[in-house]
Image: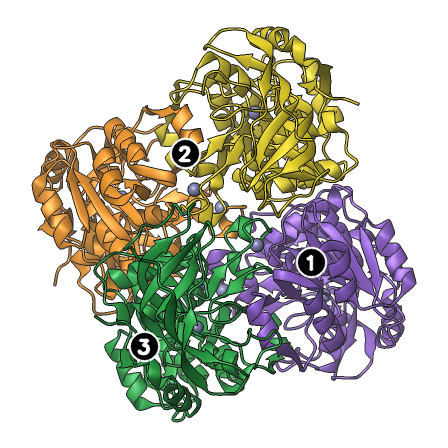
Chain colours: A green, B purple, C yellow, D orange
Amino acid sequence: MYPKIMKAAVIHEYGGPLAIEELPVRPLNQYEILVKVISCGVCHTDLHACNGDWPVKSKMPLVPGHEAIGLVAAMGYDVKSVKEGEVVGVPWLYSACGCCEFCLTGWETLCYEQQNGGYSVNGGFAEYVIADSRYVAHFPSHVNFAEMAPIICAGVTVYKGLKETEVKAGEWVAISGIGGLGHLGVQYAKAMGFQVAAIDISNDKLEMARKLGADIVVNALEQDPGEFLKKQTGGMHGVLVTAVTPVAFSQGLSALRRKGTLALNGLPPGSFDLPIFDTVLNRITIRGSIVGTRKDMQEAIDFAVDGKVRAQVKPAKLEDINEVFEQMKKGEIEGRIVLDISGD
Amino acid sequence: MYPKIMKAAVIHEYGGPLAIEELPVRPLNQYEILVKVISCGVCHTDLHACNGDWPVKSKMPLVPGHEAIGLVAAMGYDVKSVKEGEVVGVPWLYSACGCCEFCLTGWETLCYEQQNGGYSVNGGFAEYVIADSRYVAHFPSHVNFAEMAPIICAGVTVYKGLKETEVKAGEWVAISGIGGLGHLGVQYAKAMGFQVAAIDISNDKLEMARKLGADIVVNALEQDPGEFLKKQTGGMHGVLVTAVTPVAFSQGLSALRRKGTLALNGLPPGSFDLPIFDTVLNRITIRGSIVGTRKDMQEAIDFAVDGKVRAQVKPAKLEDINEVFEQMKKGEIEGRIVLDISGD
Amino acid sequence: MYPKIMKAAVIHEYGGPLAIEELPVRPLNQYEILVKVISCGVCHTDLHACNGDWPVKSKMPLVPGHEAIGLVAAMGYDVKSVKEGEVVGVPWLYSACGCCEFCLTGWETLCYEQQNGGYSVNGGFAEYVIADSRYVAHFPSHVNFAEMAPIICAGVTVYKGLKETEVKAGEWVAISGIGGLGHLGVQYAKAMGFQVAAIDISNDKLEMARKLGADIVVNALEQDPGEFLKKQTGGMHGVLVTAVTPVAFSQGLSALRRKGTLALNGLPPGSFDLPIFDTVLNRITIRGSIVGTRKDMQEAIDFAVDGKVRAQVKPAKLEDINEVFEQMKKGEIEGRIVLDISGD
Amino acid sequence: MYPKIMKAAVIHEYGGPLAIEELPVRPLNQYEILVKVISCGVCHTDLHACNGDWPVKSKMPLVPGHEAIGLVAAMGYDVKSVKEGEVVGVPWLYSACGCCEFCLTGWETLCYEQQNGGYSVNGGFAEYVIADSRYVAHFPSHVNFAEMAPIICAGVTVYKGLKETEVKAGEWVAISGIGGLGHLGVQYAKAMGFQVAAIDISNDKLEMARKLGADIVVNALEQDPGEFLKKQTGGMHGVLVTAVTPVAFSQGLSALRRKGTLALNGLPPGSFDLPIFDTVLNRITIRGSIVGTRKDMQEAIDFAVDGKVRAQVKPAKLEDINEVFEQMKKGEIEGRIVLDISGD
Ligand SMILES: [Zn+2]
Ligand SMILES: [Zn+2]
Ligand SMILES: [Zn+2]
Ligand SMILES: [Zn+2]
Ligand SMILES: [Zn+2]
Ligand SMILES: [Zn+2]
Ligand SMILES: [Zn+2]
Ligand SMILES: [Zn+2]
């Protein structure tokens, strides 16, 4: 029976609170599927969407959420790539045009006509979410839903960011910021055969990084990360800055060895001061990296399903979403909050 | 007969004038060669060397010059890679350690133990220059010495910078700044099969760029280069900024299409404002590029010897060097000044 | 008015003759377009299709042809990437699944669920051909249809083959076989900035190669290509073998310098003798290359539209197809035969 | 005190036995060092050298051995990159010209003027070996000499071979042949983050492969490796064939998924049958891979020093060398025999 209504967390104006409402479930077009949401992670981007922080704004009213994982409950008439009952994820990259230069070359994340889940279309803070079958993430049937949810956005984001550093097995990468993104970054980096340095200002988080496999950690409040890491290792081949702040940016740059690459994950407003002389003389590369393609997603999931990467999650209820956002604004969240939506 | 003395342009203190003096010619060690200089180009870096502009300063007293081309006049006992009478160039990358991670991977330009011609050792503003035989550039015997001199530094610098944009044949590259570097950049870019846009603020220089093969030109005083180039071409796959100024940097960034790369040639002090949101969302890469390796050099020379790239040069005498520097400071030089040292 | 019937060249059994028949034009599904064919090139693959030469056989009855170019005459209800009246090409890669690991990474040519034009579905030897709008090639409105037709298969095949050699601007590539593929290969190679050697056994074809830009040519009947090219150039960085015969394969291998790559275009039955010692000691790469992706196609077309590559074509009528096949079997065709289907 | 004589295993004619003799120790030139050998691995190449198996033959009389590890006992006057007492390895790539296109690009293994240890110059089956300081491998001071010896040739060979497959973390690689090379290959592949399949015909060796981390193993006598691996995994992204035999070659090819790469380690005479249709249709790459550069060597050593790769070795005495060769000819050796030369 195709559901007629669903419970969802809805926001009606930028900056306003989310309300738990009953929304109608619209019919599917040929390529769409209806996903019964089991879990959905909460991401900083959801906060930006609700606040209207970015130049291109989210739709309103909006059901946020782009880390939804659940079961295929119904399918459009031309769906071929999934089956009913399959476990799928509904990510930020909700759909793309399929025909532009980016879509043709495995870079659909750069498609100008992309739709974004929980942003330009309704997302996963709901009992059901409609998805484009060609763009969902695929999971095996027996997964820990809550732990897999953050892989759909946070996981693939750091995994792609690590790829974008072009670091190779045996080389050094630093993960700057050991939070929701960074704690996954450390694990992906180890699974990729890298030597890993963790940079943060919390000894607790650095301790966690060590447990997750970091070979060396540095508290940026206690010593200069660039100086320390260069002395200990000769410098990083790559740095992934997950917390994109001016100080993390300049610390990251200073930790690079010559020919190193700094990759940026994150979308704050503002700009950084890029020192020219050092960038040129040391042949430094700075690169922005945003989420990942469907292929990146599948690879990121495979590492997690193999047990090489495991997200640290805390459950919350859909009804708690406003409080979760409050905690997030205050920076009080460790690991990742995952909404438990139909946990049965 | 090994010469005992030579005429050279020597500077004794930072900021001081150069004097034409007679200097002794020291004996060669096993790997060294004595090069009788025919021509030597004058580069902005020579000015920086004489002014002591950079953090690591040049030796004093100094014979500047790192675009020297001439004939092998004498050889150390263990020289194998050149012959007496051969035409060679003595570049900025005077020598390197040969054993570090950079030297081992074809990136000797990043060697921390490199010596630099006309900077940490005496260079080519002289009748003779001593060179490390393993690091000289090789030319065929019948070349136009004056036209080849700028290839040794300006040519290889832009050629390497173009490679560093990772633009492929058929794609668009913009050359920002059509001066001593840029006019060579346009030609190298065409020889590499690129579609070329030229950005400058002088219509004369843009006219020259067109004659050298630029497919599209834009005067940055008359219209916004980013907007114009994006409208005309969909955006640049790469941009090479030869005149590293804040405005050229931000214009270059705005001219890139998504996934594009901005390469920087040039070593001014200061820093740039890198906008984070656009860099991440558009997956932009910014990369510093400095001179080129011996292999890059040989490739750059091959293009020039084949007639695909030709430097526009104006002759001057060694004795005119102080005036040349004055003109350079005032930005009055078009193309490249080349000192005619033993033009017989 | 959507046409009800069309004239087409149809084959009913492997090895049989083609007959000009009237076929019904079926309706379009959501993504399909109806293309009014102006020209369609004739390719060796058409012959293989009609003969049932390959392990996976073509459908029967069959309308062959995968170098069709024409105008969009009608469109399915969900077509977004083309417009009525637009000039499009209908290539070998007729469609693909869009979701497999190859489709997701810009390698749809390797999709196991691909359909092939004039092979598993009807092709362009007809007044109309139905195409998947998402997989057609795009042309500007004022093109020489006959000259563009071979770009759709022969052009993109050699262009991709050249990319697969990983040769860079300034390096040497040899094109082995200067026929329908090779004469385009020489032009693409020059447009990509390569130095080009042409290998053939016909002095006429080698003369043509020279006119098209080859820097050096060698008649394999008169001298050993490997020896000659190594002596003249130091060896090829890449070799593209368009006529995949055992002798061309071994000549190509012997012409490579160390670290060189041999790319194979063509699908004959049988196998080659790969010498192990030399392959390992010289770090040789051998790589099969088949047609090209939609992105490769668009790039190949752009070079042709810019006038950098021009196919040599001879016109024929649809009714002549059996004679054209006879000539092809005898190896009597120079350049490319293009069927002039609705040349008005 | 510079030693005057040393004990060495010397062969005087191809196919002859080795004799333990006293040889004079010649003086060092500027770049050379004298290495007091602690351990030296025995490689199949030593056998080829002694038998004169290859087109370019080894010098005679000869001291074989290119897996020597020991201490720097004396240095030429211009040695900068090592210190007395340092632990170094003397590899197959004994020295190279330093100036050719290969040496300039980090591919000195392809230098035409390379010298080879225990082949064109005397090697490590001796109390002392003279080495070129710029080409030795570097070790930390506290290593297990015997276990590190095989890294110098077998280790770097498979490590480089794995790199040459271009497999990425998370993808599948098969190691064909789990002997002296292959047992190291499994470990390197796991350290690089690959998923690993092991192919052999011995269940004992496959059991060892599992213990070393192989994710899947297949006995080629019991089932078809290609069919089995494709069914289990979708096919290998890369295959490294360490035992270069015709059957291993064709099994490796058949185990590849589309776009896969087969890398060859080993230098037997003869040739392979390369099927054209499949190579082209599936876009297969075949690549020869020989030893590794100094950079590859250092990376291979770093993995071993970090404990991620460990060679299985059996000790022998220098005096036993003829018996070791006999066992090797009969294929009776498991793992790697290492000569214990001055084990104190
Ligand atoms: Zn798109
Ligand atoms: Zn997110
Ligand atoms: Zn310069
Ligand atoms: Zn160095
Ligand atoms: Zn064709
Ligand atoms: Zn597919
Ligand atoms: Zn060996
Ligand atoms: Zn060399």
Name the amino acid type tagged 2. Asn
Determine which of the numbered discs, if any, sits on residue B236 in the image: 1
> Quarter-wise, where is residue D21 in the image?
top left
Determine the residue positioned at 85% across, 61% down: B335
**Subunit of label 1:** B
Q: Contact, CB < 8 Å: mark 2 with mark 3? A: no
- Relative to residue D328, is residue D297 depicted above or below? below
Q: Quadrant of ligand 7?
A: top left
Classify A179 as above or below D342.
below
Horizontal and vertical percent position of residue D334: 11, 43
Residue closest to the eye, D264 or C84 = C84
Determine which of the numbered discs, if any, sits on residue D282 in the image. 2
Q: Are marks 3 and 1 on the same chain?
A: no
What percent of the width, then of the height, locates residue C24? 58, 21
Marks counted in the figure total 3
State the mark number for residue A56.
Answer: none
- Of circles 3 and 1, which is in front? 3
Residue at 72% x, 77% y: name it: B246
- Pair 2/3: label in front: 3
The span from disc 2 to disc 1 (Cα, nearest Å) is 33 Å
The residue under label 3 is: A338
